[in-house]
């Protein structure tokens, strides 16, 4: 039987990506346009999984006034579309990458979800999500969905699909944690925001991940950009380090990693293999303008170039 994954993106966006050697705040900046495409964290995850030949169904909300770009993407990639249309426009986000890899994001507001639209989604999702092996919930919430309603929905959905992969930030992240998802993937900045103070060493990051595991979360993965990623679960602690890459855009690198994590879980791979694969997919994503795997041989080569080791081989005070 084929594996089936559902992704939920409540607040998708059209991403306008650009590059500038150095962004000068308060000045006129001439940005080199890289691309503009339909996106959103769960949609990016779906693209990766389709490139790995996994059946994916996408859920969430889309504005009815500018849906065409998303529909074209779903058709092109063979993604099953179960988005709910709501009145208004899906937002546009501007993503600007500098030569040092730093990403500046300008996210505009979009549609508002009504109470009736949310209740309709809530009812239908409870019926259908038991058909999937893994459910990926990621991104922010649009206007109209409050955090308590979102947390309650996640707890209910977990009864039907217990293997939930969750990737979000700020209040949405905190709300989602109450549902005890199976795997979470905050980046380092999101983890520091959650805990409320800087985490300058790997030991600090791992200790915080263990706090989250104590809340009932089985797998905690922390992405750290060019510094790699850390996986903490019952098997132990694994740290990955990607090779140096030419950075065109870091947009979607975290989503690409989530796609790799989900694929590894579906294939019942070891923790080491899962982290190596996810790190390689993320590393490949930064040297092109859109999320996706275009060359499987290149992915295999990148996996071999990823350094991976257990935490026990490190000194406890290693600085990030």
Image: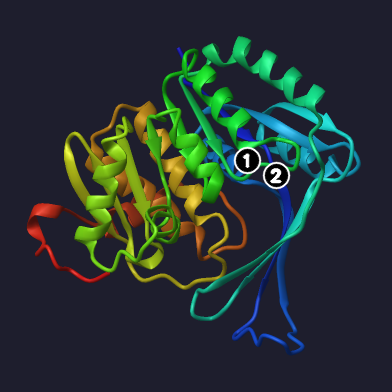
Q: Position of residue 205 (x, y in %)?
A: 27, 56
Crowd class of label 2 (few under 14; some 14 to 19; many from 20; radius 10 Å): many
Q: Nearer the viewer, residue 294 or 253?
A: 253
Q: Which residue in the structure is indicated by mark 2?
A: 12
The quarter of the picture where residue 122 lies is: top right
**What residue does disc 1 label?**
43
User: Going from the N terminus, do you reach mark 1 or mark 2 first?
Assistant: 2
**From the viewer's perspective, is residue 196 above or below residue 125?**
below
| Closer to viewer: mark 1 or mark 2 | 2
Quadrant containing the N terminus is: top left
Snapshot colouring = rainbow
Q: Quadrant of residue 81?
A: top right
Determine whether, in the image, residue 210 is placed left or right of residue 169: left
Identify the residue at image location x=63%, y=83%.
23
Q: Which mark is residue 234?
A: none
Mark 1 secondary-structure assignment: helix
Question: Does residue 128 lie above or below 81 as drawn?
Answer: above
Q: Answer yes or no: do the residues labelled 1 and 2 have beta carbons within 8 Å?
A: yes
Q: Which residue is depicted at the point 42% across and 52% down?
A: 194
Element at label 2: loop
**Residue 105 visible somewhere in the drawing:** yes
């Amino acid at each position: 039987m084929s594996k089936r994954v559902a992704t939920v993106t409540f607040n998708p966006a059209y991403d306008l990506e650009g590059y500038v050697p150095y962004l000068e705040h308060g000045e006129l900046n001439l940005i080199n346009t890289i691309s503009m495409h339909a996106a959103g964290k769960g949609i990016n995850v779906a693209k990766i999984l389709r490139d790995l030949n996994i059946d994916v169904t996408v859920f969430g909300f889309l504005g009815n006034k500018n849906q065409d770009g998303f529909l074209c993407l779903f058709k092109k990639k063979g993604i099953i579309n179960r988005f709910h249309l709501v009145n208004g426009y899906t937002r546009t986000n501007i993503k600007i990458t500098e030569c040092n890899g730093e990403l500046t994001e300008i996210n505009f507001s979009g549609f508002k979800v009504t109470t009736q639209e949310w209740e309709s989604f809530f009812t239908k999702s409870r019926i259908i999500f038991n058909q999937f092996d893994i459910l990926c919930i990621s991104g922010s919430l649009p206007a109209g969905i409050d955090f308590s309603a979102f947390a309650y929905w996640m707890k209910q959905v977990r009864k039907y699909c217990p293997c939930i992969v969750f990737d979000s930030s700020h209040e949405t992240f905190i709300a989602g944690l109450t549902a005890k998802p199976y795997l979470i993937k905050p980046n380092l900045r999101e983890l520091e925001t959650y805990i409320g103070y800087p985490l300058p060493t790997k030991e600090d990051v791992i200790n915080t991940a263990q706090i989250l595991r104590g809340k009932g979360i089985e797998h905690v993965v922390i992405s750290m950009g060019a510094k790699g990623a850390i996986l903490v679960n019952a098997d132990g602690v694994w740290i990955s380090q990607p090779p140096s890459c030419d950075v065109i855009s870091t947009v979607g690198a975290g989503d690409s990693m989530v796609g790799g994590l989900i694929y590894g879980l579906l294939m019942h791979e070891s923790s080491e293999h899962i982290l190596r694969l996810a790190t390689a997919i993320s590393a490949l994503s930064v040297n092109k303008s859109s999320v996706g795997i275009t060359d499987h041989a290149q992915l295999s080569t990148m996996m071999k170039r990823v350094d991976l080791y257990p935490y026990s081989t490190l000194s406890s005070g290693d600085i990030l």
